[in-house]
Amino acid sequence: MSSSATARNSAERRGRLSRRLAEAGLIPGPRRLASFDDRSGVLGTDRLGEILAELGAPFAAFGLYLARRCDLLPGPVCFALASICDRGEALPATTVEELLAGALGAGGPLASFVAEPARVGLLYQEHWATARDGQPLLVRLARHGEPDLEATLHDLDALAPVLGIDRGRFSALFADYRRALDCWSDLRGQAERLERLHHELMDEGPVVVPRLVAGSATRRRMVVEWPGRCEPAAIGGAPAERGLERRVASAWLEVALVAGRLPVEAAMWPLEDGRIVMLPGEMAALKPEVRTTLWNYLRASAEERPDRAAEWLLPAVEEADAGRATELERRLRQIVPFRDGRWSRDGSTLAEHLALHWRCVTEVGLKPRPYLLAFYRGLFSLVGREGQRSPQEDPLREAVVDLRWRAGWRGWRRRAAPEALRRSAESNLLGLLELPDNLDRLLDLADGVGADSPLDGLIAPPLAGRRGRWSTQLALGLALVAVCLAAVRLSALDLPRSIVEISSALVFIGLALLWLRTTTRR
């Protein structure tokens, strides 16, 4: 397309956008009804979502992005924008054939391909396929190329006065959206991140990450092995079963804070065994110290400890001088979601508190670090729609409890692993072998042996004559106590019988060596 045609299409889109915004009363015009800036209601915001959906997928995708930015927009506005339907028109058959070039047919990984899309979203459409060995495959195709998306980005400037966001903040918001759009439209980059995440998780825990089909990824195509046995109709969305939001939030937290791969935007589906399949679109890598900061902040917020939450939130923001830090702490202590903007029935969910935390950071003048911005966006991509489905529940807070339990369970399993038990038994055996010498040295000190004894003259001489008998009795008594404690602990563990037998044998060998050592010493 020539540059003149591109400019003409852009001018037409901007004109259509301005006319629709004026008709809805969102900008000055002949049919102005109300101002968006006064946040007087959701009438204008509902119309804004409709307008963005009418203008095409790039505009609708921007509306869904805005639904995650509750630091700049009120909660009702975010929920109104989150209602934009993530549905689009299927690609023409000829375009699909072009995108599948080299993957279907002789030499390609696909043995068969279902032409009817299983799901068509704003940016992707997905098809079922079958590998040559019979493995079910999921084929993701990007619906828009990079030039199509770039052509519409400049038209989004017209929304700045509608949203009531100053030019500086809108520029930062626009830059972040553009970076996110690059991640969404580059399926080759998604495939690389997916492959790394699959190797790190290895299908452990509540999350299943599909395996990438080797050599199948291009910039607009990605093929993965589907791990479940669901029908094609189930790919479009899961039924609103009880506890599904909690499982999805648990899976998200597991990947973000345990694996260190924060899924800012991801598609997730439930499997028959209760696990969640995750196909991430945009991800951010988190260093261990960042994960510790975010986990402690999230945990303090879930426990409703605002001072502790502010302590862990401050390292995640920039320009945090003493005055702004004090103001942020004060605002976090005074947050009342029921008053400041509620989503649920009583305004007490963890997501509502986190949304107000994010808004307080912005209002105080602090700038979130990139990982904190990604963390907030990823969290609110979960609760943007789920919060309205079950307002009486708090799936995010329950997911934090689940993550704490799983972290404790993993630590306990590591300590109870055969290798860990072997190392523990070896260290205990070494201590038992050294115990007689240590007792003898202690009793020598008690008997006054040595010119520099610190106990010289403090203990009566008759004690020295009974040194051998006391050493034996005390050592055997301590060893028996150790045997009893070890037996109780091992009997409570669900361990193989061989491990219990080996551990018991090591303890009794140490006891026998202790007996010989103490009885043969003169």
Image (cartoon, rainbow, N blue to C red):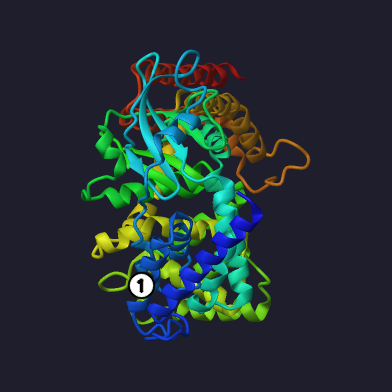
Query: In this rendering, would 38 be left or right of 394?
Result: right
As shown in the figure, which amino acid type bears the numbered disc 1? Arg
| Position of 313 relative to 120 (above/below) | below
Q: Residue at x 33, y 59 (%)?
A: 385
Quadrant for the C terminus, please: top right
Q: Where residue 270 sits in the image (x, y, percent)? A: 30, 40
Query: In this rendering, would 202 be left or right of 290?
Result: left
Q: Residue at x 53, y 34 (%)?
A: 191
Residue corresponding to mark 1: 47
Front-lying residue, 454 or 250: 250
* Local secondary structure at mark 1: helix
Label tally:
1
Q: Where residue 381 sits in the image (x, y, percent)? A: 42, 56
| Position of 438 relative to 8 (above/below) | above
Q: Residue at x 36, y 66 (%)?
A: 50
Front-lying residue, 157 or 441: 157
Residue 385 seen by the camera? yes
> Given the current orientation, which residue lies at the most extreme right position?
451
Residue 81 sits in which quadrant?
bottom left
